[in-house]
Image: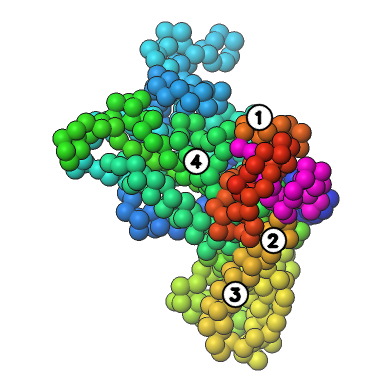
Amino acid sequence: MADAITTRADDYSQWYIDIVRGAKLADYSPVRGCMIIRPNGYALWENMKAALDGMFKETGHENAYFPLFVPQSFLAREAEHVEGFAKECAVVTHSRLIDDGEGGLKPDPESEIGEPLVVRPTSETIIWNTYADWIQSWRDLPILINQWANVVRWEMRTRLFLRTMEFLWQEGHTAHATKQEAVEETLRMLDVYTTFAEDYMAMPVLRGVKTASERFPGAVDTYCIEALMQDGKALQAGTSHFLGQNFAKAFDCTFQNENNELEYVWATSWGVSTRLVGALIMTHSDDQGLVLPPRLAPTQVVIVPIHFNDEQRATVLEVARRIEQELADAGIRVELDASEAQRPGWKFNEYEVQGVPIRLAIGPRDVKNENVELARRDTREKEIVPQKGLTARITELLDRIQEGLYNRALQFRQERTTAVDSYDDFKAALDEPGGFVLAHWDGTAETEARIKEETKATIRCIPFTDQLRGLDEPGEDLLTGKPSEQRVVFARAY
């Protein structure tokens, strides 16, 4: 049985780690800052990946794969890009090891490679070097490519799923003939991420554009979705970047347009990562364990048979297997736990910690009465329901659980979103209730930096004003009194 879980009120950070490890999602690696994704966690990521991959292909994208290693000189070609990632790069300088004479190993001095190779922190540079070879004419455009890969960023302070040195992600890289097409692509993919977050993760998000200081290195504009976690901190859940012609110029990627004029290609990139698993945990889970939205749960329904002798076991399992088959035939991801190693009570606790949305228990009395006990993970409510019509009931209930989790998270966000007009009220709102604070900003990096230094809050985005009431109201900056056209979203963040 999983160890006791620390409560959110007692220690939110430890609660999060307890959930990750208790639900068997991930574990620590022998390599500092990396993680081992366990089968439960990887199954969750696979469901996320499958949903997103389908959405990418529906919008015309194809999958490809580019090398893990990037020549060091490639990063240096785009000035903002290298400045943004230089301190996070892992660099390969030798190709083999030799005996160090003391029972260990060391790099062979004679195997030093000519140009160091960077383990990819992101793939813009190597992809745009390739696109320069692929693109000659407007007929070669657009190129709409995504890759599923791992990346390495040498983080010093790490946390399972939320920030690790190596993580899994997808990165889309597209090339276009016009600025308008590239901007439309950037916003289209932001909409894809929004739909995924809200319809699959049941996690409400705010959409907007990043400030210059928070922009992706090398981008003209970075758009994002921001979610609010239960401790009142924000989490950037996805980004979509309009790269302009910056990378095309860095890699001399040009094309002949329809007027036979030479132009630089317009670019986008966009990505989400296994950080979304952390977002899912912190959006929905409780002090008993993981809570999963049914659309992403690896197992949506678990059936636990209860019996006290071999005769009862045979009878109960016959009914349990019939129910399992009926649910599976309806497309429900169902598991029958007929193992004998643990008692039913132990299993109940395990599946609660692991966040299975619905648990069915069936014993001899249930067989006789043609009932089952149904337990919901989201509300922890139990009821006795008839076996007849069970598949339709569960199908409908899974949809209600999905909708209920979204509405609960949305209500939480609404309760933790505060509009303020003074700096004192701003600082107070960050502490209590915490969450998103909507305030005016004069648009200067100096004011943004001062607020961050004094309060640890950052501008999460300049939001699209159709999402919350009052965002488009003009006003004055909290600190300088300078005019501001709209409110921006501040929060302390992961």
Q: Which is nearer the N-term, disc 1 or disc 2?
A: 2
Q: Which residue occupies the foreground of this view, 299 or 213?
A: 213
In the displayed structure, 86 sits above or below 9; it is: above
Label 3 belongs to which residue? 400
Q: Mark 1 points at which residue?
A: 446
The mark found on residue 414 in the picture is 2
Q: What residue sits 76% from the left and 33% below the top?
A: 454
Q: Which colour scheme is used?
A: rainbow
- Element carrying mark 4: strand
Report the front residue among 314 and 287.
287
Q: Viewer-proximal residue, 142 or 87?
A: 142
User: How would you rate the neighbour count of disc 4 (Cα within 10 Å): few for under 14, some for 14-19, many for 20 or more?
Assistant: many
Closer to the camera: disc 3 or disc 1? 1
Whether 201 is drawn above or below 343: the answer is above
Q: Earlier in the sequence, mark 3 or mark 4?
A: 4
Choose between 458 and 1: the one closer to the eye. 458
Q: In this view, does 393 lie above or below 175?
A: below
Q: Can you give x and y, in whole percent of width and height, for residue 173 in the image?
A: 37, 41
The segment highlighted magenta reads 418-443
Mark closest to the chain's N terminus, 2 or 4: 4
* Callout 1 amino acid: Glu
Q: Does the magenta stretch include residue 26?
A: no
Mark found first going from the N terminus, 2 or 3? 3
Q: Distance between the residues labelled 2 and 3?
A: 21 Å
State the SS at label 2.
helix
Q: Which of marks 2 and 3 is in front?
A: 2
Q: Mark 4 points at which residue?
A: 222
Q: Is residue 230 positioned above or below 215 on the image?
A: below
